Amino acid sequence: MNSEMKLRFGRKVISVEEARAELYAYVMPTETETVSLPKSFGRRLANDIYADHAVPHFRRSGVDGYAVRSEDIATATQDSPVVLRVIERIPSGTMPQLTIREGTAARIMTGAPVPDGADAVVMLEMTDSLQDASVATGDVKVRIKKNVQAASNITPIAGEVARGEFVIAGGSQIGPGDAAILATFGYSEVEVYRKPKVAIFSTGSELLQVEQEMQPGKIRNSNSYMLAAQVEAAGGSAWIMPALTDDPEEVEAALAAVLPDVDLILTSGGVSVGDFDVVVELFGRFDGKLLFNKVAMRPGTPTSAALWKGKLLIALSGNPGASFVGFELFAKPIIKKMLGSQCPEAKASTAFLDVTYDKPSAYPRYIRGTSRVESGTIWVQPAGIDKSSIMVSIKDADCLIWLPPGGQGYQRGDGVRIYTTL
Amino acid sequence: MNSEMKLRFGRKVISVEEARAELYAYVMPTETETVSLPKSFGRRLANDIYADHAVPHFRRSGVDGYAVRSEDIATATQDSPVVLRVIERIPSGTMPQLTIREGTAARIMTGAPVPDGADAVVMLEMTDSLQDASVATGDVKVRIKKNVQAASNITPIAGEVARGEFVIAGGSQIGPGDAAILATFGYSEVEVYRKPKVAIFSTGSELLQVEQEMQPGKIRNSNSYMLAAQVEAAGGSAWIMPALTDDPEEVEAALAAVLPDVDLILTSGGVSVGDFDVVVELFGRFDGKLLFNKVAMRPGTPTSAALWKGKLLIALSGNPGASFVGFELFAKPIIKKMLGSQCPEAKASTAFLDVTYDKPSAYPRYIRGTSRVESGTIWVQPAGIDKSSIMVSIKDADCLIWLPPGGQGYQRGDGVRIYTTL
């Protein structure tokens, strides 16, 4: 067997986990960049975030009402209220000027600082103002109709977050809750990882560009757009390159030309044993290092990868379903690792098989699946099981169903492992 | 009770569903715009998509191998192969020139058109080439070592998608699978709904801007950023407006000024019964129509909404947790409806409660929750149950746990309804 024949037929099969480990060895986080807080939504944080001040940083009232000394109102009831003199009115955002002493209270708003001397706040609904309480001076009095425990309705200093407390891990994707935390701690600008640039090539002389008219025997290039949408969803920046013909020199030149400008190259097609599998030919002629060219998985067994001039190249099968799955298993975690993610791989979970699936396989299967929940239990079935089109079924998938190799197939109700892809 | 007192205390409570129906009555989809296919990812389709050609539009080989007449090889076995003359070689993307007649075959690649006369394709692995099969002319022969049924490894015309078939519903969010379909059917440009513009105001004299230094008694405006991230995740375009003080005239002027330019206004804060609840005051003075000002839900009972100069205004509670929940229940479905979504509301599902929660409520509760899956079963608990900060817990939530009103609280293992927020 010559070396090209070896690339085609003498392939050494490795597991999905081994293949990922091969790739991970060459993945570095991208450099970071600073963006405004609103531009950071959906991006990944470059640094751990710690609280630069306590939350709250003052004793905060949780309700609208009256700040009191709890001992003053210990006997207060509906029938026998306690009357206190109102010495101050404290809107949110203002500091109290006076100290609450025996027999006095302060009108206080939700979120306002509790004055010194007060150890509780009584809700407005449990009081009656004896004059218009909106007058901040004079002999305003309040009738307190319920006693409350000391500390009631007061969040102490640092009651939510202590100064210096760890609040968000670097690598986290910035969602609404993170945005609130970053704003609270003054991050008008946020350091995030630069989006990895991912060049996407589809190969095959049968491919038309999207804007081209249909031609006999040809199809429009759809994988590049599917992969680009997957890249963007993973947090990368997709560069859709012109589809390549089956000329190995052209493929080598096109990939080499873009290599310096991108963080990752994806190809689809050209990796199996056909006569025109140009990516296989590329691996036979380039000056890079082949990492693997056969993975114990279905679909996508001939999924291959190489390191070329310091950049990773992942060669996916041309079949749309295999291309989708290969992206989820290999490219997505790489992009997420480049973005600093601590959990780059799809979340594994469990579910029950909603159909009987009696196609045993020599390799583990990763089946695009759709899930439904019934009475708190997750049921999954292959996506588009009622459809004949692989392509049309991809949009319905929300998970990958993992089925181990061998066996006699699987019955409805069998427990299976799933990986969330949405 | 005067009219302002009525707004504060004489509120009529309506259900979450009634409140949504009030809002929906005034929601129209935004106009549409045309963007390039790669720019359409994540956007929502303005139109139903139908297949403009069959897929495949030719009889397509599913494997690399030889196109044959199945009757010619009916007796073929490993020990007794059938030899056929190879009359043509058909790469993907090229049309066959010759018809397969008795005793002949064509070398064919995956995805290539099957020649007339052939009714099956035999996989390469079940054949031996008797000469170099890459020479397309001359006396090339192939030894077929296995018989196959008629139709084997051929996808018939329209086997995946018929011409004119409905493939994607208008209002769908364009994901990787949709991108592949759009590319296949030649949509280099895609008509999508314009992103609704959502102005976000937080109210309260206690609010500092994110870039400001901390001051006694004050806090930085975090709700606006949380809401902006929620708006963007829902598909809208968030306009973060400067925080407003507690001056009703200023609030009215600021909201009125932005109204002509946006599709929706969100406010947070100022809707409860405090002395400085300016949004309540706005509803007492503006020339709009109050839709509701009390919803049977916790948190966020005082959530209010109005129609003002033809635009919806949703006034959320200032508490970060209530603001988050109010957005998910009211603002998100409105934004999704403006984008043509057919299912604008959060997906309802079921799960088991992972903790005992013994706080009965007069109103239904919507608790920010986190889920985990164990043996195919979903368990949920309140997010950040181990944390004292509402704000810090929001980032951990992936669902809302719905608990009905009344009752004695809920035990671990009770079935509950959940709404997915991620």
Image (spheres, coloured by chain):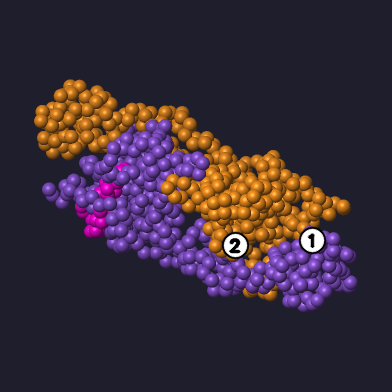
Chain colours: A orange, B purple
Image spot of residue B144 (x, y percent): 81, 65
* Residue type (three-letter) at the residue carrying disc 2: Met
Please name the residue that numbered disc 1 is placed on.
Answer: B126
**Rendering coords of residue A196 (x, y %):** 61, 48
Secondary structure at numbered mark 2: helix
- Left or right: where does residue A166 sit relative to residue B53? left
Above/below status of B65 relative to B408? below
- The residue that mark 2 highlights is A391
Tell me the amino acid under the disc marked 1: Met
Side (left or right) of A8 relative to B359 = right
Residue A61, position as x, y percentages in the image = 28, 33
Marks 1 and 2, Cα distance to the nearest angstrom? 28 Å
Which residue is located at x 41 percent, y 32 percent? B387
Please say whether residue B295 is one of the residues in the magenta stretch: yes
| Span shown in magenta | B284-306
Residue A162 place in picture, x, y as percent: 42, 28
B347 relative position to B175: left or right: left
| Crowd tier of the residue under label 2, counting other residues whose Cα lies within 10 Å: few below 14, some 14–19, many 20 or above | many
The image shows residue B387, relative to residue B84, as above or below, that is above
Image side of residue B198 versus residue A126, left or right: right
Q: Nearer the viewer, residue A150 or B66?
A: B66
Find residue B164 and report its image quarter: bottom right
Disc number lying in front (1 or 2):
1
Label 1 CA crowd tier, 10 Å (few <14, some 14–19, many 20+): some
Query: Residue drawn at (10%, 28%), measured in percent from left and top?
Result: A80
- Give the dominant element type of the magenta stretch: helix, strand or loop: loop
Q: Secondary structure at mark 1?
A: helix
Quarter assignment of residue B213:
top left
Q: Mark 2 belongs to which subunit? A: A
Q: Residue A417's quadrant in the figure?
A: top right
